[in-house]
Image (spheres, rainbow, N blue to C red):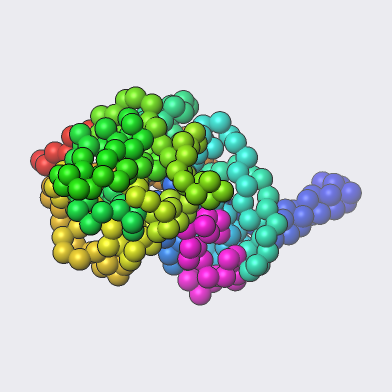
Amino acid sequence: MNTQTFLKLSLAVASLATTQAFAQVEIRLSGAVAFRDTAYRSIRNLFGPNLASQNPADGPTAPTQLKVTWTGKLPALYGEQDVTVYAFYNGAVAGVQDLTQNRLVNFLASSTPATTNTINLQSDIAFSSVFQQATEFTTPTLEDSLFGATPINLVKSSSAPAGITNITTHQFKTLAANGAVPAWFLTGNSNDTQLVHFINRDPTAGQRVTIFKEALFTGNPIQYAWDTSRNEFVVDPIGRNAAQITTHLNTYGPAISYLISVDSFNVNGGQNVLGYNGSKAFAGTFSNTANNFSPVINGQYSLWVYEHLLNRTTASANIRAFRDALIASINAELEVSAFSVPISRLRVERTADGAPVAPIE
């Protein structure tokens, strides 16, 4: 080997070493709003004391905070490389679409607190509250990892009659098909003559897919939203996100909608959760610290979804390593979660969204 060739090789090796030393790992997540609280704590736990910064600094503390970006190190996974994790909880169906169509997702560009600049990147992993086959984005097939179950609650507005305490599958189908029903249809009291309006989630939400499959509703729903300029409910062609529904139920009505547990608690402190077919997802009093989800665990309450992590079959080793570590972190978090149940506790199972709940053999 001549001197010139040796020098070129040495420079190439040095350059590679420098690149590896300063290499950065990026992981991008999108998908279900339903798991943002669990996801946030689980990712934060992965970083632990090695977290350098995160934006927003306080995490997703409100329903409107759907984007978080973290930077730090994950020595167990990537050694001393800097790691940036981007998350945008844009909806379960949207997350599936992100992966199957390689869509660009709008993340917070920096983990520096209070920075609002965004960046468009492809998502690597999607949280979902529905199976891929329940969406219209069925190809290419994604890898699916199940890790928990989360109840969906039917919730009434603060102005709804006190006599509305339960809603059956039949009543829900009628409400969704007509957009509004007289309150007596839900209370049995002929004096309850107010109209109760239906507020629906937007099409990106896995909860919307699930509740219609659960109720065997196959028509086109009629849904309403409050128009502040007219001071009345008007037909809503799109549907609302969780934050908007929470505001509607706390402020306007009478109305009924549906939310996951963490958002249900934001409506009148969780006091407006209704029974579904005679049962609630929890036994006893609903709490934001701990709940007894035995009706879900034992099969008396069927309005719940599996928690999924989806990734492309072409995912890199870095992405798969993060996915596996995240699932382990989530499983630990679910053991103490106030709003979801680890799969290991379920004594029932279902094969698809809205499918019958059956005992695990």
Q: Residue at x 60, y 65 (%)?
A: 55
Q: Is residue 293 left or right of residue 72?
A: left
Is residue 246 something one can see in this rendering?
Answer: no
Q: Residue at x 53, y 59 (%)?
A: 65
Residue closest to the far bottom: 49
Q: Residue at x 51, y 75 (%)?
A: 49
Percent across and percent down for residue 215 are 25, 34
User: Is residue 44 positioned above or below 124 on the image?
Assistant: below
Q: Residue at x 43, y 40 (%)?
A: 224
Percent across and percent down for residue 83 are 59, 60
The quarter of the picture where residue 157 lies is: bottom left
Q: Is residue 64 left or right of residue 6?
A: left
Q: Is residue 335 left or right of residue 208?
A: left
In this view of the protein, which residue sits in the foreground, 84 or 359? 359
Percent across and percent down for residue 219 are 34, 24
Q: Is residue 243 located in the magenta-colored stretch of the structure?
A: no
In this view of the protein, which residue sits in the foreground, 240 or 18? 240
The quarter of the picture where residue 289 lies is: bottom left
Is residue 228 something one can see in this rendering?
Answer: yes
- Span colored in magenta: 46-68
In this view of the protein, which residue sits in the foreground, 224 or 52? 224
Q: Is residue 66 located in the magenta-colored stretch of the structure?
A: yes
Instruction: Please state, as top left, top right, bottom left or bottom right, where the C terminus lies in the image.
Output: top left
Percent across and percent down for residue 309 are 41, 45
